[in-house]
Amino acid sequence: MDVRQFESVYRLGKPAPHPTSPIVVVERRVPDVASNRYVRQLWRVDIGDGSSEVLTEGRLPAFNHDGTRLAFLRLTPEGHGVLTVRDMETGTETECDTESDVLDFAWEPEGTRIAFSARHWHDRPHATGEAAHPRNGTAPRVTTRLFFDLDEHGYFEDVSSTVRLVDVDGGAAVVELTSGDRDDREVCWSPDGSAVAFTGSAFPHCGEAVRDVFVHQLATGESTPVSGHGFRAYGPVFSEDSRHVVFIGTPMAPNGLAWAAMCAGVYRAPVDGDAGVSAVAEAGLAELMIQVMPQPSEVICAGDKVWYTAAHRGLAAAFSVPSDGGLPVVESGSRYHVHHLAHAADGRVVAVAGDWQSPGELGVLTDGEFQSVTRFSADLDLGKLPAPQTVTAVASDGYDVLGKLFLPAGEGPHPLIVRIHGGPYWFESDEVRDDRLAYTQAGYAYLTCDFRATMGYGMEHAVAGLVPVPAGQHYPMVDDILSLLEGVCAREEIAADRVGVTGGSFGGLLTAWFVTHVDRFVSAIVESPAIDIEALMGTSDLGWMGHPGVTGPAAEMDVEVVDGDIKGTVMDVDLAPLAEQVVTPTMVAQYEGDLRTPVDQGKVFYRALRAYGKESAFVLFPGGHHSIEDRGDPQLRKHRIDYFLAWWSRHLPTTDNPRTPGNVFDLRLAQGTIGDAGKETR
């Protein structure tokens, strides 16, 4: 993929409206391959006339109460956040001496103080004797908890975060609101200035996986959990009257160790904690993304309504609902994928949203539609972008299946790559993404499927993907994908005999399932897969939530767990022993830093393939984590695409992605025992 095109796929951050004017400041994040960093520009946009200009470099902008100052985080070369304040009249920027790595912050209403969460890295003491590390003498990590690591976060023993106050005018020391070995973050300040809210763990007073919303009363110095120990909560905001805190929460099982719902909802709790938590949009009625990655959903309070983002028929839509609960209303139409929301000075809700033509624009939500104000994508070197075509099919049991097809330029017939999303309770939107762009511009058609278990189609559709089936029958989600595939392959634009399949995480599991069970695909890429679900329980950062000792008794979770498996479903699977059945050349890709589906999951599948003499390659990318497509280092993301294209070129070459003599996989396989003439390969 051309570097210029890769660097054209930018992302926008959360917008910061000016309190008295139509000005909004928003971060525009652009990958820079040469420096292996992201260039984070803060843009000043007038949502009245659409004019815009670059202010400075930073992230997470926020105006003070009168708009004379703009606070933001400037990142050090190590990625640490430095709280910085810009005078909007003079342009002077001042770094606040917080002596810490700032994660997020909130201005004091009508004041000069800022509340912020700060990350603290712990230097484990150097040990002596047998406890010392043989190379550097660092003491080992010691834990007695189930929940001790998290993908993209690392090990909790290495880092903690607390809430602090700083006066940006100086003259006072930084004040600690919380202290100790905690994980407090996501700070917000009540409109009346009396309290600060944040999320954190109340363990050992509740289960390890519970995250509560705390309210810290500045007058008394007391922090009180108000969300009832019943949720994994995030994204808190105060109501405009300061009497409630609204938050996104995933209901937890009574033991506080496992999710009790497939998705999150919107809830509110009184600041005094007396009346208990009530639902604004119950989990299931609303399908908000569970927090397994930073800020997958957002919530804001605007007037007498609560606005939030949630999955809706293949995209993330903006919804509104009365603040005391009711039926959610879609406010962003059916085209745009909404990332961020904010309440503007004139009462409108501004949003950041993308679609198949743009990685993201700033606009307003009006009359149930998103109206773009900016044209950040107008001058990008993205080439011809394929418009998504809705495709349908009927599964063998009569179930209606929906998907999206992206066709490259030219008449075809084109080779097809089937992309299977992760989750399985997740989705893939239509908005511009770098790998889809690379594939279509290399001459491949690209197919996605909203199979049973996909998020955004209601709970009945979600649970239908995990219905047990008799031995020998296809799982419902497998049947959906194959039915949609055959319908698409009947089109004249598609080369039906030149089809590849790929997917990551749960999509990697399904890709591995396909190559071990059906002889339909010419080539496959299994990325960060879940190969052995039972082993994943003990090795994944979140896999332990599926252990019968954690989820049981079964009545608490409303699922049937037998010997740790959901019997008869795709979750009752170990694919490595089935590698002998594979006839599809298969690449397995993993990331060294992945804690969600660790390296051993892909390694065991690859080694089984090679042991049975199959044509296969194992690509272990240095560093990284489970969700590198958007948030990984730019060079790693670029290498991922380049290596994937090189693999496709071996068995699915195109004019724009030809098989060349210098192909890295040709060279590696020629050095091994299996080449193009390997046993039982195509």
Image: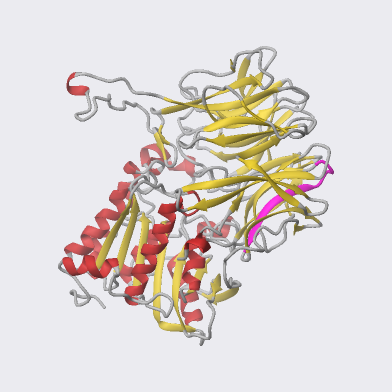
Which residue reaches farthest left?
A: 673
Q: Is residue 308 above or below residue 240?
A: below
Q: Magenta: predominant secondary structure element? A: strand
Regarding residue 83, the answer to whether it shows in the image is yes
Residue bounds of the magenta highlight:
345-355
Establish if 131 lies above or below 608. Answer: above
**Does 354 appear in magenta?**
yes
- In the image, 618 versus 18, the foreground residue is 18
Up-down relation of residue 309 to residue 105 (above or below)? below
Q: Quadrant of the C terminus?
A: bottom left
Residue at 32% x, 69% y: name it. Answer: 515
Picture quadrant of residue 652: bottom left
Q: Position of residue 220 (x, y in %)?
A: 67, 12
Which residue is nearer to you in this view: 329 or 469? Answer: 329
Q: Is residue 263 above or below residue 584?
A: above
252 magenta-colored: no
Q: Position of residue 107 (x, y in %)?
A: 70, 28
Q: Left or right of 439: which side holds 278?
A: right
Please name whichever residue, 518 or 109, is drawn nearer the observer in this view of the structure.
109
Q: Position of residue 213 (x, y in %)?
A: 60, 29
Give the residue displayed 57% in from the left and 55% down from the top: 10
Is residue 326 visible in the rendered image? The answer is no
